[in-house]
């Protein structure tokens, strides 16, 4: 099955070529949604100047060569030279029938690329903040979508598990004892653990000295230090996994590829860059200076790959990620789903890697920039006391808010169902709020708005699916049995709007994969849920008089349900059976 744009675009292109010759073979047909018809073609306006003709004349000539009788009911030239195309109900019905029978619902399978996706990446023994929440949620949606499109996605959770703070953290863990309640904080309230270690480090000179010696021992591969480090990372993993489980994030332990995994590569990274003349010593540090990167006062901005004390940093391990993802993982396209403020860092890392020949030109790198999550005061979200927010506590709050909404709006649901559904609604609310705005823009974290059962929210779309399921329960039919072999016959305007919306799933999912923008899918699902609501208001389904009309409408309901559930699944959101 095809979407209107997919069928019409090549037809208009062919008409343009027939009308104006092979020079116009690649002219963009410029298809847009229309206020007056289903599709508006704006090509005539774009081509008029090149042809030296009036746009209206260009449009009329295109019409002469346009072959769309099987698709369109009406073709009109309007205004200065727009072409308005109205799709025939027969075509819409046939495509929707085909879609209902298609297991992929018209989502194409693309030529498989290998796509490592770097996302989530929290830090060991530190709280995951809402920024990490957002890269986790957006990265996961992209991973699911690209996989669905047929790509080989390699999840890379680049956790911060190496570096100077580990001396202090390990010493503190040794001091409090690995089995102590203080050690358990790493799993439950990591910042409290981190803060305690920090306080000790600042107050106690002897402790600080031991902490410094501990980093050196750790980096040198001292077995005991490594053992304690492994223990600490293990505790943190429990914390991360608890968050991932609550949120339904598809990251597993096998996806961990933290900074420490690159430790053995760092010396080679520095050596190779030095030998190639790309890295130079500057004030005791090993630096890369790239053309066009200047810092304050116009001084060249270095990418420091070895500090003056001999330690390696964030940039060095990120250079190693590039090498690893290209050489070992065989990346065709690499995504780094990371906070927008790290744009300069990534650009410099990639530019350095390109210079070194580690990043061939055909490998695409994309920084999927994650914008800030703000509080009511429009500053980075924190607790009322100003402390960083505990993500677990935030998720608890979301569950309570979702529960309150269910209690208020769905009192007829039994207690057990409301208890079971509240977390699903809460996670949908939080995730959808992250996903439905452009990932690089800021947004205000407002739980009341997120859990609302109306408006552009996760719960609204979940609710649409539950409503459709209840139609099938009342009909005593399983949705899967409603779509096979029943021709969809689109007659009423609301049926037509719904059917045309359904046909857009494929193009939307393709666009999400191409532009890496899950908010396009959110906007689509919201529009579809609204179209369904209109349809359901105007077109009786179970009470339809004619048996064929009833079957056709049930097939529309079933297809809508599958599209909504599939779309939510690509976003990593569950659709409760009842709510
Ligand atoms: N751990 C880092 C942070 O919390 C994010 C790491 C992102 N990934 C990367 N390859 N640099 O900010």
Image (cartoon, rainbow, N blue to C red):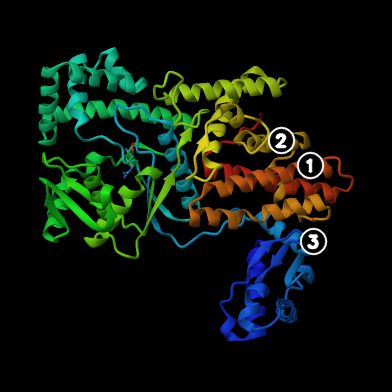
Task: Name which residue lies at 73% across and 53% down.
Answer: 499
Q: Which residue is mark 3?
A: 89
Q: Point out the image quarter for the N terminus.
A: bottom right
Give x and y (percent) for residue 544. 86, 44
Q: Is residue 262 left or right of residue 139?
A: left
Q: Is residue 567 left or right of residue 553?
A: left
Instruction: Tell me the SS state at disc 1.
Output: helix
Q: Which residue is mark 1?
A: 536
Query: Which residue lies most toward the right here?
Result: 545
- Rounded to the nearest whole Å, what is the CA distance between mark 3 and mark 1? 19 Å
Indicate which disc, 2 or 3, sits on the residue closer to the N terminus: 3
Quadrant of the rendered image containing residue 340 = top left
Q: Are marks 2 and 1 in contact (CB under 8 Å)?
A: yes
Q: Which of these two is toward me, 91 or 268?
A: 268
Q: Which residue is mark 2?
A: 467
Give x and y (percent) for residue 5. 65, 64
The residue carrying mark 1 has its beta carbon less than 8 Å from ligand 1: no
Give x and y (percent) for residue 297. 26, 49
Instruction: Tell me the SS state at disc 2.
Output: helix
Disc sitting over residue 354 in the figure: none
Instruction: Tell me the SS state at disc 3.
Output: helix
The residue carrying mark 2 has its beta carbon less than 8 Å from ligand 1: no
Indicate which disc, 2 or 1, sits on the residue closer to the N terminus: 2
Can residue 248 be seen by looking at this rendering? no
């Amino acid at each position: 099955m095809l979407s209107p744009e997919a069928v019409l675009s090549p037809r208009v292109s062919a008409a343009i070529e027939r009308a104006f010759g092979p020079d116009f073979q690649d002219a963009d047909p410029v298809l847009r949604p229309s206020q007056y018809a289903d599709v508006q073609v704006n090509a005539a306006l774009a081509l008029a100047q090149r042809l030296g003709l009036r746009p209206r004349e260009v449009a009329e000539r295109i019409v002469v060569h346009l072959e769309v009788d099987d698709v369109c009911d009406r073709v009109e030239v309007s205004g200065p030279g727009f072409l308005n195309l109205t799709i025939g109900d027969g075509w819409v019905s046939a495509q929707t029938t085909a879609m209902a029978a298609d297991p992929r619902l018209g989502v194409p399978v693309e030529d498989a690329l290998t796509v490592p996706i770097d996302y989530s990446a929290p830090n060991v023994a530190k709280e995951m903040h809402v920024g990490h929440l957002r890269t986790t949620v957006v990265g996961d949606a992209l991973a699911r979508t690209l996989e669905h499109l047929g790509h080989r996605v390699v999840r890379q959770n680049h956790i911060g598990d190496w570096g100077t703070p580990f001396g202090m953290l390990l010493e503190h863990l040794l001091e409090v004892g690995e089995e102590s309640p203080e050690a358990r904080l790493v799993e439950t309230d990591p910042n409290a653990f981190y803060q305690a270690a920090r306080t000790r480090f600042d107050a106690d000179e002897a402790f600080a000295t031991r902490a410094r010696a501990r980093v050196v021992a750790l980096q040198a591969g001292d077995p005991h230090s490594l053992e304690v480090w492994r223990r600490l990372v293990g505790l943190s993993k429990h914390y991360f996994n608890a968050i991932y489980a609550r949120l339904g994030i598809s990251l597993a332990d096998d996806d961990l590829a933290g900074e420490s995994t690159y430790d053995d590569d760092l010396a080679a990274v520095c050596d190779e860059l030095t030998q190639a003349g790309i890295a130079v010593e500057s004030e005791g540090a090993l630096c890369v200076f790239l053309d066009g990167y200047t810092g304050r006062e116009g001084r060249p901005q270095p990418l420091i790959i070895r500090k003056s004390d001999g330690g390696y940093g964030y940039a060095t391990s990120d250079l190693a990620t590039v090498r690893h993802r290209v050489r070992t993982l065989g990346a065709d396209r690499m995504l780094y789903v990371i906070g927008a403020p790290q744009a300069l860092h990534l650009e410099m890392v990639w530019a350095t890697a390109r210079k070194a020949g580690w990043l061939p030109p055909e490998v695409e790198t994309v920084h999927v920039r994650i914008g800030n999550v703000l509080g009511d005061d429009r500053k980075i979200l924190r607790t009322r006391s100003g402390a960083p927010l505990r993500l677990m506590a935030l998720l608890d709050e979301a569950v309570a808010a979702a529960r309150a909404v269910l209690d208020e709006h769905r009192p007829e649901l039994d207690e057990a169902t409301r208890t079971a559904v509240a977390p699903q609604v809460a996670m949908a609310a939080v995730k959808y709020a992250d996903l439905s705005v452009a990932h690089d823009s800021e947004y205000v974290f407002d739980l009341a708005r997120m859990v609302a059962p109306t408006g552009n929210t996760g719960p609204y779309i979940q609710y649409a699916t539950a409503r459709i399921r209840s139609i099938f329960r009342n009909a005593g039919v399983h949705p899967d049995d409603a779509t096979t072999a029943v021709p969809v016959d689109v007659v009423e305007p609301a049926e037509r709007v719904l059917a045309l919306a359904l046909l857009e799933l494929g193009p939307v999912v393709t666009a999400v994969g191409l532009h890496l923008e899950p908010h396009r899918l959110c906007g689509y699902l919201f529009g579809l849920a609204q179209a369904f609501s209109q349809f359901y208001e105007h077109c009786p389904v179970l009470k339809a008089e004619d048996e064929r009309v009833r079957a056709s409408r049930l097939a529309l309901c079933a297809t809508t349900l599958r599209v909504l559930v599939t779309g939510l699944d690509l976003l990593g959101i569950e659709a409760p059976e009842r709510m």
